[in-house]
Image (spheres, rainbow, N blue to C red):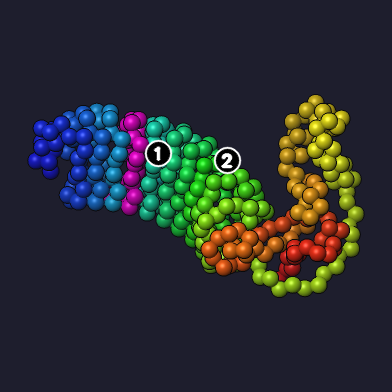
Amino acid sequence: MAKLVIRALQGNATSLNLSSKKMYEVPTSVSRLKNVTVLLLNNNLITTLPVELLSLRHLSELNLGNNALKEIPAVLGHLGSLRKLHLYRNQITTVSPEVIGGWPNLILLNLNHNQIKRLPPEIQSLSKLEHLSVMDNTLEELPVELGHLTKLTEMNLNFNMLSWLPQQLYNCKALAKLHVARNRLTALPEGIRSLSKLRVLDVAGNELSMFPVEFHLLELQELYCEGNCFVSCEPLVSQQPAEVLALKELVARFVLLEDRNKCSLVHRALPCYPPSLTSMLEDSGRCALCLGPFLFTWLESVHFIHLKKDMKMRRSLTVPVRVLLCSYKCFNRHGHSYYAVAPI
């Protein structure tokens, strides 16, 4: 190891490979490589890092994969030049907010095969992050602050313990690949259509019963969804009596309908009302048949989508997609292919 460091010093090297050297600690002499940008320390027995590494001001890529770290060394939080950081196959259980806040230029973070239970809200500081991989950990939830990672293009959360995903995830408009296979998801949040650049979605091995509204409008190229609990298409005749809507629902539908007309008095008056009213109306939905708005009262139905025919994908697979109707009046109309979901 010493010979490798000396040779690198003599050659004013910008990269140093110390992987698979059975090291328990990193030689402090590495800190003398002022111009090094790539440092490979993977496949060793490292448990900590020397504070002398603070001098590596130009370090952009660091590989500490397959070592014996039980936490992310504090010294890493002071290496603001890092762009790629690999910490896979260690024994890390927590991600320190102080450390993660010191990587303003990070574009890739690999935390695969650890024992991480949660990610801190401070992850939002990784504003340049493009690739995040936390596969094979023990995550039970994700911070809503993930929605601030607007440059994120790929995220791998396979093999965790997630039972839900935050809706704020859909603020990551650049997301092209999302892997959440082998978790405990029972549903995906509504609004998935906002991920207009999503091309690969892996939700295999979860507990999904159907996909969210407008899922079929995504321009997916690959979908992996085996091993879920999707509702099956076994049509039964059903005719439901028209329901009586509450006064609050009727008023809300009238206001929402009038708000569509930019010249209406209602549309012009709404900004004068408390923000709580506007916030409530923003949670409204739209009937898949009549396209009319609704607020609280709706009927959950399902539409069976053929991936090859309806989404132009290569797979010949039919999947259920959630559909919301505003009333039994719409549901009882003839000529549509929406089905109510019957209890088992």
Whether 205 is drawn above or below 81: the answer is below
244 in magenta: no
Under mark 1, the amino acid is Ile
**Residue at the (72%, 43%) spot, across then down:** 283
Q: Quadrant of the C terminus?
A: bottom right
Q: Quadrant of residue 36?
A: top left
- Residue at which label 2 appears: 171
Q: Nearer the viewer, residue 16 or 186?
A: 16
Compared across the picture, whether 284 is left or right of 218 comes to right
Bounds of the magenta span?
Answer: 67-90
Under mark 2, the amino acid is Asn
Q: Nearer the viewer, residue 217 or 54?
A: 217
Q: How many labels sit on residues?
A: 2
How many angstroms separate mark 2 from mark 1 (CA)?
18 Å
- Residue at which label 1 appears: 107
Classify mark 1: residues with Cα within 10 Å, few (<14), some (14-19) or many (20+): some
**Residue at the (24%, 40%) spot, across then down:** 39
Compared across the picture, whether 240 is left or right of 26 comes to right
Q: Percent from the top left, x then y, of residue 205? A: 51, 64
Helix or strand or loop: what does disc 1 sit on?
A: loop
User: Quick one: label 2 or label 1, which is nearer the N terminus?
Assistant: 1
Whether 285 is drawn above or below 204: the answer is above
Q: Percent from the top left, x then y, of residue 107? A: 40, 38
